[in-house]
Image (cartoon, rainbow, N blue to C red):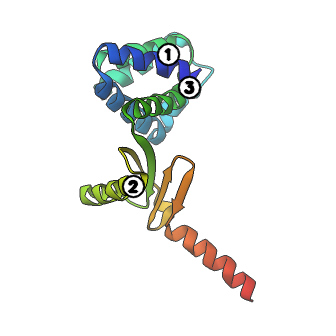
């Protein structure tokens, strides 16, 4: 279902020459959903009336400054009682857009927010390994303590301090 909604939005955005604007709106929406428990309750609650959900999502979209097409799309999703699928729709849209542009999607999780120079260095390193355009989704997870986790397709490189400490702990249990 998410693929159908994402595909329809991608086609519409392409017709309106608004791919970058819609993509930026959806990235912001994805971060908002991940960061806000109230927004999660709104989209996942089966108890809310569809008109209340549509009105609330409209207010969220307007306050976030989303474009008209994104606002109308969110209204349609709310009217069809499919808000629970928004995280999957956002991911599917970003994947389809990256495929269309010939980009490889990479997910980078860091212990703290990276500076622009660090982001550029990580992006360049991934480009050298992949050998093409890369779109990077940056996330922050303080539980990593330090280092990065990089996912490109089915490959994962875990250079986090948390994982290194876990491996060290396992190794020390085996010695004793």
Q: Which mark is residue 133?
A: none
Q: In 3D space, how far apart are the residues under numbered discs 1 and 2 (Cα atoms)?
A: 35 Å
- On the picture, is 116 further left or further right than 90? left
Mark on residue 77? 1
Instruction: Using the image, determine if residue 168 lies above or below residue 97.
Output: below
Q: Which mark is residue 126?
A: 2
User: Callout 3: helix, strand or loop?
Assistant: helix
Q: Residue 151's spot in the image, x, y percent? A: 50, 52
Instruction: Look at the numbered discs 3 and 1 and tell me whether their residues touch, using CB distance below 8 Å.
Output: yes
Q: Is residue 83 visible to us here?
A: yes
Q: Nearer the viewer, residue 30 or 160?
A: 160
Tell me the SS state at disc 1. Answer: helix
Where in the figure is residue 9, as x and y percent of width and height?
Answer: 43, 18
Disc assigned to residue 85: 3
Image quadrant for the C terminus? bottom right
Q: CA distance from mark 3 to mark 2?
A: 30 Å
* Residue 52 can be seen, yes or no: no
Q: Nearer the viewer, residue 155 or 13?
A: 155
């Amino acid at each position: 279902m998410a693929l159908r909604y994402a595909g329809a939005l991608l086609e519409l955005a392409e017709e309106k020459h608004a791919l970058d604007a819609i993509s930026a709106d959806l990235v912001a929406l994805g971060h908002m959903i991940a960061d806000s428990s109230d927004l999660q309750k709104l989209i996942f609650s089966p108890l809310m009336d569809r008109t209340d959900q549509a009105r609330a999502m409209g207010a969220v979209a307007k306050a976030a400054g989303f474009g008209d097409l994104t606002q109308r799309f969110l209204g349609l999703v709310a009217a069809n009682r499919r808000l629970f699928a928004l995280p999957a729709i956002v991911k599917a849209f970003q994947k389809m857009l990256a495929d269309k542009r010939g980009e490889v999607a990479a997910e980078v999780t860091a212990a703290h927010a990276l500076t622009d120079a660090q982001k550029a260095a990580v992006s360049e390193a991934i480009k050298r390994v992949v050998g093409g355009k890369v779109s990077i989704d940056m996330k922050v997870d303080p539980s990593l303590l330090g280092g990065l986790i990089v996912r490109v397709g089915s490959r994962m490189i875990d250079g986090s301090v948390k994982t290194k400490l876990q491996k060290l702990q396992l190794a020390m249990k085996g010695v004793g």
